[in-house]
Image (cartoon, rainbow, N blue to C red):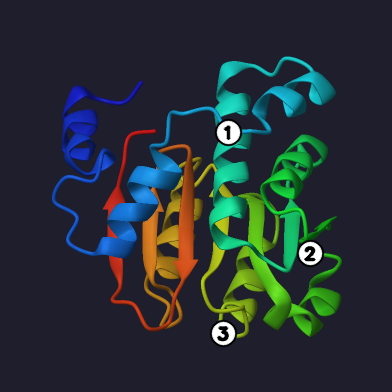
Amino acid sequence: MESLKTIINRWRQTRGYGVQSPNDYGFIRNVIAEKMPYYAYRQLEKEHGRLNKKTCRKCQLLFRIANYCQPRLTIVCNNNAETAKAYMQAGCKQAKTISVDCEKDAEKLMEQASDIGMIYINADGKWFDFLLQASQKLADKAACIIDNIHSDKETEEKWNKLKELPSTGSTYDLRHCGIILFEKKQYKKHYLLNY
């Protein structure tokens, strides 16, 4: 359980207070903190059954990010890939969404890196090396969602290194996952949010 101090420190920016960038404010308010049900939630729930609350919130967040980014190609490197893939596909119907193993398929993915607009990764395995290589080639305004960024010290260090990459724009630490927006023309800013 996180300490009360941590929750209070994150509270201010959770609803966009103190965020100076209009783009970042819009992303926090309209994508991350959005509470209204989207048009596809009910249909997705029927297709995939009732999810536990945490998984449901995460899948709905993936849906909203896909809807925001409108990627051409979406990559899923995660253990609950099918449900996440369906939510991301519903968020952007024209996107091609594929499930891959970042470790085994890294070479093939690097060839398509300029088309990748969204990546969803579980923070285990060799995902970090792939992201370091791909970060320079990803489409502008691409989003990367990394699960379990605080699972251990090594993963936290990797997350901190990714935040400092030249191609990284805004980053959002939601406690259970991190979001990186690769917007090369935007100033680098890191937000700690309660989600």
The first of marks 3 and 2 along the sequence is 2
Mark 3 Cα-neighbour bin, 10 Å: few <14, some 14–19, many ≥20: some
Indicate the amino acid at tag 3.
Answer: Gln
Whether 115 is drawn above or below 65: the answer is below
11 sits to left or right of 81 = left
Whether 147 is drawn above or below 36: the answer is below
Residue beneath disc 1: 38
Q: Position of residue 128 (x, y in %)?
A: 60, 65
Most foreground residue, 130 or 82: 82
Q: Is mark 3 on a helix, strand or loop?
A: loop
Residue beneath disc 2: 103
Q: Residue at x 76, y 80 (%)?
A: 110
71 sits to left or right of 98 = left
Q: Position of residue 115 (x, y in %)?
A: 72, 77
The first of marks 1 and 3 along the sequence is 1
Indicate the amino acid at tag 1.
Answer: Tyr
- Marks 1 & 2, CB-CB < 8 Å contact: no
Residue beneath disc 3: 136
8 sits to left or right of 176 = left
Q: Residue at x 39, y 33 (%)?
A: 195
Indicate the amino acid at tag 2.
Answer: Glu
Cα–Cα gap, marks 1 and 2 = 34 Å
